Every structure is written in structure tokens, then in C-alpha cells.
Image (tube, helix red, strand yellow):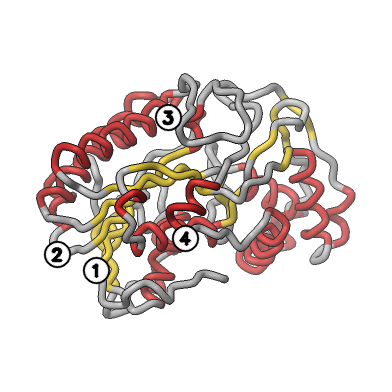
């Protein structure tokens, strides 16, 4: 883990919504190690209790079970906090296509509840997880914050609405907000199971079971895969930055390079083969493309570098090596599972 916390005060009280999820639990861990007081709000819709189990006895950690669709619970969560790192959401483009109503309830109504609670509790700054899906059908590469297209899924719509609401709350109520458009985040604690699992942990667990991963399309679709520690750095930089020009806007959070799915699978096979040589012989299966998918995604991170001082340490190869090692240690199937 290469996360610099030297500029972050240790006495701050920070609420992490979705704190039992993949990104949220990693944020909680880093903040606790820094000496901060951390409150985690989660309802375990997608988060996992095991992600925060080891933090529960810590005197600076408080877990609050609740749903962001409950305004009263949002107020309770924000009370006495200095900052909010809002990670809670119902992710996944396919999930939103299958169930747009729940996606909207959580991602829009829940987001609005959190903004209201943050405003009423005089939160110093509200930093929220935005999404690269906001770029929609824009074909321009690299993706720059000021140029977006039309959304291609209900999920993308909800994440764009978040940005609009945050902007209005900044201008109308003076609430400081920063949005971070995450690009395909991966790393330790990312859940490989379920119908809406992200591609990297899904491929890893399949390869460890000697199963052929299924690639949607011909494997030419590409993404700016972003290691979790880069995302943590962006959140920390968003808390400590004092430049007024850096507030009330959104930033791409990525590494700034893209990798197609065929190359991704090759890298995963290479790194996993260091633990089990049989994995290098497994080939992919190819299936139909996925509705709502953007063909290519590549971020410009110049704005984040310039205004936030964002400087991602992990490229795709360094991040995958660390992620694969974590998955091998924590999720390697038993011999019975692979027979």
C-alpha cells in the first residue's frame, strides 16, 4: 500500500458511506491507520461485514447500519462529522438496466438525502463517488471532464444527476463538494461473486478455479483500469486541498492509460501462473457484447493533477500484481472446489 497520509490531520472525524463496500472499507482502513475518527454507514446491500470486521473493536471506528434512503439515518450519520466520503451507491450498468427504479432510489434519492444531511450538519466538505459512465456516448479520447455525451444506462443517468445536485447545493447552500469520476477501480476486497461482479475479480476467481473466463464481445473493448490506492489518494487529496478553484467541480480518477480485455486476461494469467503454472493454459470464451457498455474508456487526469495534486502511483501492471497476490492469499479455492 503506497498511500501518502502525511497531509491529513489525524483528529478529523470522517463519515464513509458504503464503508463496508470495496472502496469504502479500504478508505476506512487507511483513515483509521492515520488516527482519524471514522464512522461507517452501510446497509450491506452490496457491502460485506467481513470487510470491516477487524475494525469494529477499534476505539476510533463506529459502525452504523442503515440505508441512505432513510433521511433520519443520514442525519444521524452526519452528526458531529467534519467530512463525508460518500461511496454508497447501487453500482453496475447491467443491474440498473434490470432494475432502474431501485438504482434511482438509492443513487438519486439517497444521494439527495446525504446532501441535505451534510448541509444541515454543517459538514466541511462532501466528497462523492462519481462515475466514468457519465461520459456516455461521447467518442472523444481521452475523456475530459468538461465534455460528456448522452448516458447509455440508468446507472449513468443517476451518477450524472449526482453531479448536478452537488453543483446546485454548492451554489445554493454553500456546501463544499468534490466529485470523483472513478474509472474501473480494482484491488483488494473487491467482491468476485454475484451476477454483477466487476471483470477483474470475476476473471481472477474463474482462473483460480481453472474455468474459462467469458469475454463480452471480441475482447477489443478497453478500459482505464485504476488500482484502489490511486482512488484512496484522490479522496485524501480532495479532503486536504485548500485551493478554492478546486472545490465545486468533478475530476477523473484513473491512471491515464487503457488496457483491452484480451490484454487484461493475458496479464492476469501471467501473474496467477506465478502461483499456479496450470493457469497459463486456460483460454477465454467469447460471448455477445453487453448492453449499455461503452466501447473504450481513457481518462485525462490533467485536471486532477493540476488542481488536486493527484499523482497516481500504480499503473495496471503494478496494481494487478498486488491485487492478484491478495486474491490468491484470501480467496484461493480449496482443492475440493477445483476438482
Q: Position of residue 20 (x, y in %)?
A: 38, 58
- Toward the viewer: 120 or 44? 120
Q: Position of residue 83 (x, y in %)?
A: 25, 60
Q: Earlier in the sequence, mark 1 or mark 4?
A: 1
For disc 2, the marked residue is 80
For disc 1, the marked residue is 13
For disc 3, the marked residue is 155
Query: Can the viewer see residue 48?
Result: no
Choose mark 1 or mark 3, whichever is in front: 1
Quadrant in the picture for residue 235? bottom left
Report helix, strand or loop for mark 2: loop
Q: Position of residue 48 (x, y in %)?
A: 42, 56
Quadrant in the picture for residue 49? bottom left
Report helix, strand or loop for mark 1: strand
Q: Are marks 3 and 2 in contact (CB under 8 Å)?
A: no
Q: Position of residue 46 (x, y in %)?
A: 41, 47
Choose mark 3 or mark 2, whichever is in front: 2
For residue 46, side relative to residue 253 (left or right): left
For disc 4, the marked residue is 232
Residue placed at 54% from the left, 62% from the top? 229
Report helix, strand or loop for mark 4: helix
Q: Are marks 2 and 1 in contact (CB under 8 Å)?
A: yes
Q: Residues within 10 Å of mark 1 (few under 14, many from 20)?
A: many
Disc 1 to disc 4, C-alpha distance: 17 Å
Q: Residues within 10 Å of mark 3 (few under 14, many from 20)?
A: many
Residue placed at 73% from the left, 57% from the top? 317
Disc 1 to disc 3, C-alpha distance: 30 Å
Quadrant where the N terminus is found in the figure? bottom right
Q: Are marks 1 and 3 in contact (CB under 8 Å)?
A: no
Amino acid at each position: 500500500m503506497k498511500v501518502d497520509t502525511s497531509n491529513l490531520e489525524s483528529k478529523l472525524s470522517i463519515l464513509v458511506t458504503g464503508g463496508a463496500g470495496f472502496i469504502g472499507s479500504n478508505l476506512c482502513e487507511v483513515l483509521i491507520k492515520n488516527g482519524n475518527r471514522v464512522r461507517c454507514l452501510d446497509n450491506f446491500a452490496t457491502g460485506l461485514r467481513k470487510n470491516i470486521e477487524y475494525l469494529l473493536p477499534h476505539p476510533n471506528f463506529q459502525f452504523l447500519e442503515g440505508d441512505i434512503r432513510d433521511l433520519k439515518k443520514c442525519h444521524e450519520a452526519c452528526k458531529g462529522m467534519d467530512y463525508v466520503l460518500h461511496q454508497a451507491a447501487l453500482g453496475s450498468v447491467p443491474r440498473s438496466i434490470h432494475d432502474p427504479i431501485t438504482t434511482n432510489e438509492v443513487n438519486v434519492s439517497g444521494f439527495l438525502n446525504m446532501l441535505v444531511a451534510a448541509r444541515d450538519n454543517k459538514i466541511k466538505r462532501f466528497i462523492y463517488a462519481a462515475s466514468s459512465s457519465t461520459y456516455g456516448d461521447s467518442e472523444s479520447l481521452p475523456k475530459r471532464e468538461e465534455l460528456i455525451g448522452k448516458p447509455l444506462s440508468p446507472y449513468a443517468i443517476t451518477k450524472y444527476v449526482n453531479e448536478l445536485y452537488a453543483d446546485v447545493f454548492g451554489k445554493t447552500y454553500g456546501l463544499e463538494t468534490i466529485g470523483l469520476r472513478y474509472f474501473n477501480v480494482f484491488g483488494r476486497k473487491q467482491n468476485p461473486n454475484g451476477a454483477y461482479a466487476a471483470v477483474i475479480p470475476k476473471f481472477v476467481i474463474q482462473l483460480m478455479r481453472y474455468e474459462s473466463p467469458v469475454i463480452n464481445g471480441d475482447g477489443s473493448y478497453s478500459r482505464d483500469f485504476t488500482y484502489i490506492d490511486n482512488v484512496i489518494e484522490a479522496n485524501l487529496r480532495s479532503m486536504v486541498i485548500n485551493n478554492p478553484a478546486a472545490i465545486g467541480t468533478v475530476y477523473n480518477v484513473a491512471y491515464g492509460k487503457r488496457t483491452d480485455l484480451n490484454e487484461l486476461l493475458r496479464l492476469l494469467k501471467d501473474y496467477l501462473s506465478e502461483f499456479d503454472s496450470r493457469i497459463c493454459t486456460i483460454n477465454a470464451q467469447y460471448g455477445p457484447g453487453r448492453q449499455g457498455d461503452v466501447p473504450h474508456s481513457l481518462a485525462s487526469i490533467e485536471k486532477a493533477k493540476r488542481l488536486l495534486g493527484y499523482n497516481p502511483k500504480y499503473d495496471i501492471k503494478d496494481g494487478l500484481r498486488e491485487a492478484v497476490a491478495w486474491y490468491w492469499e484470501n480467496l484461493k479455492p480449496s482443492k475440493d472446489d477445483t476438482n
